[in-house]
Amino acid sequence: MSTTFDMDWGSIREPGSGGNVDFMKLVNGPNVMRIVGKPSLIEVHWEKAADGSTKKIICPGAGCPICKAGHAPNSRYQVKVIDRGEKEEIKIKVLEQGPTVFNAIKTFAMEPEYGDPTKYDIKIKKDGAGRETKYNVVASPKKVNLTDEERQAIEDSKSLEEINKPKTIEEIQTMGLEILMGSMADLGDLGGSDIDPENLSDDDWNNLWFLKLKTRLVNYQPCFYNTMNIMLKNIFYLYIILKKFNEG
Ligand SMILES: [Zn+2]
């Protein structure tokens, strides 16, 4: 950010939103942009939340609870661009795409006549929707230098590293993701424990492996907790009974 005096109150940024960068939404037809940085590879999880929404989670790597639960992340490429479709002001955006589009850009970048893709505009033509979407990348043969204003806007924009800062493992666990909400598969962990169902006390319950899951639930939805606690407890009793039944 550059120093700015006597600002309008409206320009005071919300906490944590410094230099907000939008994602480049590709529309059907031509999308013209200038690449203004180096590409990055981002590992992304798309996960369903209990409220029905789909959440995008940057994989934190080692210790990621979503990976541990068996969902592998998707690789996405990102690069910062200037959206040439924004005529009013210089808008730095993030182009996020899979390998198809980025390989097409790479072809130009590796081609001596074109070279460094920050020196010319590119046009991505999008056609269709969903899995049938086709992309066609064309590079402008004209090399045009960036203006000072454009350079300043690039400098002022958040880095891709900042934009993709992963949540902490605790934060991910309290997002209410379905995959981390505990399932019957979790109950299998009980296999080795030697609990006497005859003398099962609340202490046993409270000391159990479920504790982590319960903590998650408390964080996720405190009002939900009591109901869930009772429900989980009943599942647990049922499990013990079935286990004894099978063994006997
Ligand atoms: Zn992960």
Image (cartoon, grey):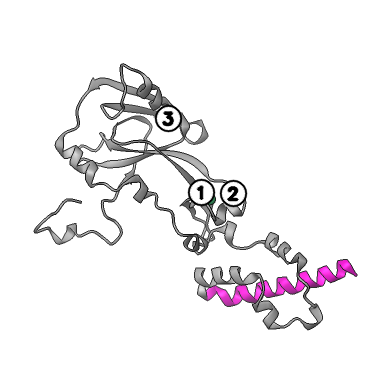
Relative to residue 92, is residue 58 depicted above or below?
below
Residue located at (26% from left, 61% from top): 14
**Span shown in magenta:** 223-248
Left or right of 228: which side holds 175? left
Question: For the point 42% across and 30% down, which residue is it?
Answer: 101
Residue on which the image places disc 1: 45
Query: Which residue corresponds to mark 2?
Result: 71
User: Which residue is pictured at 12% across the width and 54% down the height?
Assistant: 4
Q: Is mark 2 within 8 Å of ligand 1?
A: yes
Identify the residue under disc 3: 101
Q: Nearer the viewer, residue 48 or 77?
A: 77
Q: Residues within 10 Å of mark 3 (few under 14, many from 20)?
A: some
First in sequence, mark 1 or 3: give its number.
1
CA distance for labels 1 and 3: 20 Å
Residue type beneath disc 1: His
Answer whether labels 2 and 1 touch (C-beta < 8 Å). Answer: yes
Q: Amino acid at mark 2?
A: His
* Residue at horizontal 32 percent and vertical 22 percent from the top: 115
Q: CA distance from mark 2 to mark 3?
A: 25 Å
